Image (tube, coloured by chain):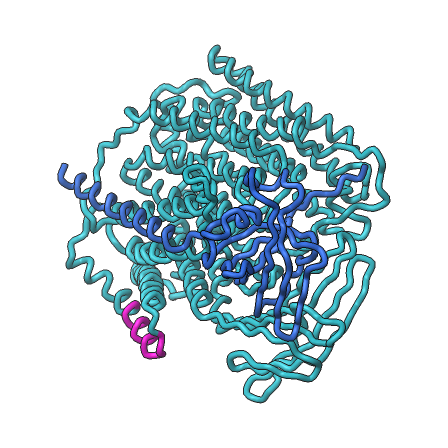
Amino acid sequence: MPSKLRFVVGAGLIVLAIGYLITTAVRNTSEYYLTVNEVGARQGQLSGQMLRVAGRVKAGTISWDPATLTLGFAMVSPPNPDGSPVKPVAAAEPAEFHVIARGEPKPDMFAAGRDVIVEGRLAADGTIVARQVLTSCPSKYVPKQAK
Amino acid sequence: MPLIGQLALALALVVAVYSIGANLLGIRRNSPDLLLSARHALWAMCAMVTVAVAALWTGLLTSDFSLEYVASYSSVTLPIQYKFAALWGGQQGSLLFWTWLLSIFTSIAIFQNRRRNPEIMPWALVVLAGVAIFFLGMLNFVTRPFDLLAAVPPDGSDLNPLLQNYWMAIHPPSLYTGYVSAAVPFAFACGALITRKLDDGWIRTTRRWAIFSWFFLTLGNLFGARWAYEVLGWGGYWAWDPVENAAFMPWLVMTAYLHSVMIQERKDMLKVWNLALIGMAFMLTLFGTFLTRSGVISSVHSFTQSGLGPYFLTFLIVVVVGYTALLASRVKDLKSPAEFESYLSREAAFLFNNLMLVGIAFAVFWGTVFPVISEAVRGVKITVGPPFFDKVNGPLALGLVFLMGVGPLIAWRRTSPQTLMRTFLAPLTMGMGAGVVVFAMGLRQWYVLTALSLAAFAIGTVVVEFRRGVSARRHLVHETPARALVNLVAKNNRRYGGYIIHLGVVFAFIGIVASSFFRTEVKRSVRTGQSFSIGAYDITYLGLKGVETAHLEDLSARLAVYSGGRQIATMAPAKLFYKRPQQPATRVAIRSTPLADLYIVLAGVDDQSGLATFEVFLTPLVFWLWAGGLMMAIGTVVVMWPNVRERAALAVVLGRDEALGAAPVPGGD
């Protein structure tokens, strides 16, 4: 029996170590994942935080300077949230945020009206300084209904 | 043609339901005729699904745009190989493809076991038919591949440009093959549990299926990584995206399973654990499909949002609850007489390797579903990105590589510390030596130093094993070293194939560590004639060239690459503008050497200023990730190679069952 106990202890230690790794990693790496409207609703408390924000690129707001690799655009909530995995907060005002991304090339799929996920810090003036702009690339995209 | 396909799918569903009824009734009445009829029904199901697949392929190849599926995922100008690949380019087609594989594998399993496992087989077939019925139900009622369009468009909207790529054409089939073939061992496990035939017969019977599944999961993951590397143009190959995780988790659990079944075969231990692992592996394949089909977790690969999610979730819950209950009800029968004796034993190494693999799988699972859980518990969606996965899995990977070095050399049951020291002297020296060399080269990151030392240690173990085997043969049978090596592997293909896989894993690990820690990146906008440099390379932009075809417009930049004042290459990264759907894509230029990959992306061309923007990555040793992957594949083929001794062992195990008074074999002699 003692050898069995020793193994239970050994295995338990490994499980504990894995649990410890997971909990500390969660604490150190988690980011809020919000929609544009949700960020709008709690702008005050989120200022200065790392966020992942899902939204849509507003038409006519894109500026791109290839010499300095600076991309700027305004991000709004998708007008039609059904089918979107992100649930809108019921009472939130429609919000709009200016996003600025420096030093990154413009993603291929980036265009007005595209859904994007922006990873970055919310500055005090309400601009999102992006570390990364991800375009939702529909690897199996919804065909337009030809009816 | 569409009508034939539709009809075939309906018939397939009918015969699948019939086969379950015939099997259950046949088991109850002990009627070989009914059981035989159930098998024939599943063969008919396979034939019907094949007809449906042929019908959809015909639609794609003849550009029959009256089919909604063809109009959505193909076009007149789409190259023919991608018309073939469009079968799994969309949701309906990929589910049909899945079902097709399942029906083929079921038929093969029936043929293999026509005279074997008379008791387990009917139940295993009930499970396989149950899975098939779920998928056929989806294809018949929820997401139908043969729906027609009211107005036939002149041309289709084309396959997503990102999927028009060699790797993407082979990545989904590999992954699906890996996913679906996991159903066979799972079904046998269910059969063994139901019939209480809980020795290792089911494991031996399905061993090759499990390895086959593992082989294709490995390839599927590697092809996906390679595709991301070549096509997405961000210089990396893995981003811990939920969809990638969904493919990685079953691989981890299947790896654990393949190791722990060896303990059961040898020591009759860990029976419950093995049954749990194969259950988890199968559930994770379903979970992966659920994840990609439901939109529950947002991914950069946002797949078609469809109404499939709730169905998949229900099916998944039924499988999880049903299997867990079944396993729980049999725990009493699964008591093992043997026990672990010592930490210094191969059993212990395998046990800890299992804990780590499952631990990694759990961490990946947790990180993947974390947004959903945090939203449910705290009302806020919180994500954990790649840093989470790196932080957790990095240390666990070190543990695994260490155990990979220990496992092959340590004895079963127990080893004395003295023997241990003697056995491990050479590999330990190699490991330490590598650490010292790397330290002397100026590397100071503790993780890299540890990782490379452990990698050298694990390689050392394998080298020692091969050397020992070869020299034994040379002395006993007087063979030349080369001959001895070949015979050694041929005569013990399971063992030495496994070592080849280990080597592949270690090489891939080295590639992953080096590319994660030492990748450098330069982003620059330049005019024709201007130069910039990265690492030891100087790169000059020579100009643009545009080519237009009916399908796409290809704008490629020419760059001369110099090293030490000498031109070593001309590279041509390109931007592709697809015409339908109008969408740009990137063609990366890669110059790969065993030391480092030079990776150039044409990120954009500004028409007004004439500036071309390049993103250049220099990634050391990433070559070894792919080389290691190739070795893993070769090793797996060696392991799967038919082996006379193994077949004899299986016959003994199954014969033992029959001697204990099994039912007569239907259709047998």
Residue at (45, 62) in percent of width and height? B512
Q: Is residue A36 left or right of residue B152?
A: left
Q: Is residue B169 visible?
A: no
**Chain B drawn in what color?**
cyan
**Chain A drawn in what color?**
blue
The vertical placement of B245 against B516, above or below, is: above
Q: Residue furthest bottom?
A: B565
Magenta span contains residue B434: yes
Q: Which secondary structure type mostly characterizes the magenta part of the structure? A: helix
The vertical placement of B435 against B530, above or below, is: above
Name the image quarter holding residue A98. Answer: bottom right
Residue A69 screen position, x and y as percent: 62, 70
Residue B149 screen position, x and y as percent: 80, 34
Q: Tag count in the figure?
A: 0
Q: Nearer the viewer, residue B626 or B560?
A: B560
Q: Is residue B75 left or right of residue B42?
A: right
Residue B515 screen position, x and y as percent: 46, 66
Magenta span contains residue B437: yes
Residue at (66, 71) in percent of width and height? A65
Residue B394 screen position, x and y as percent: 37, 58
Q: What range is drawn magenta here?
A: B431-443
Q: Is residue B542 left or right of residue B28?
A: right
Q: Nearer the viewer, residue A81 or B287?
A: A81
Residue at (49, 54) in percent of width and height? A51
Q: Quadrant of the N terminus of chain B?
A: top right
Q: Is residue B357 visible?
A: yes
Q: Nearer the viewer, residue B585 or B12?
A: B585
The vertical placement of B259 against B474, above or below, is: above
Q: Residue furthest top?
A: B29
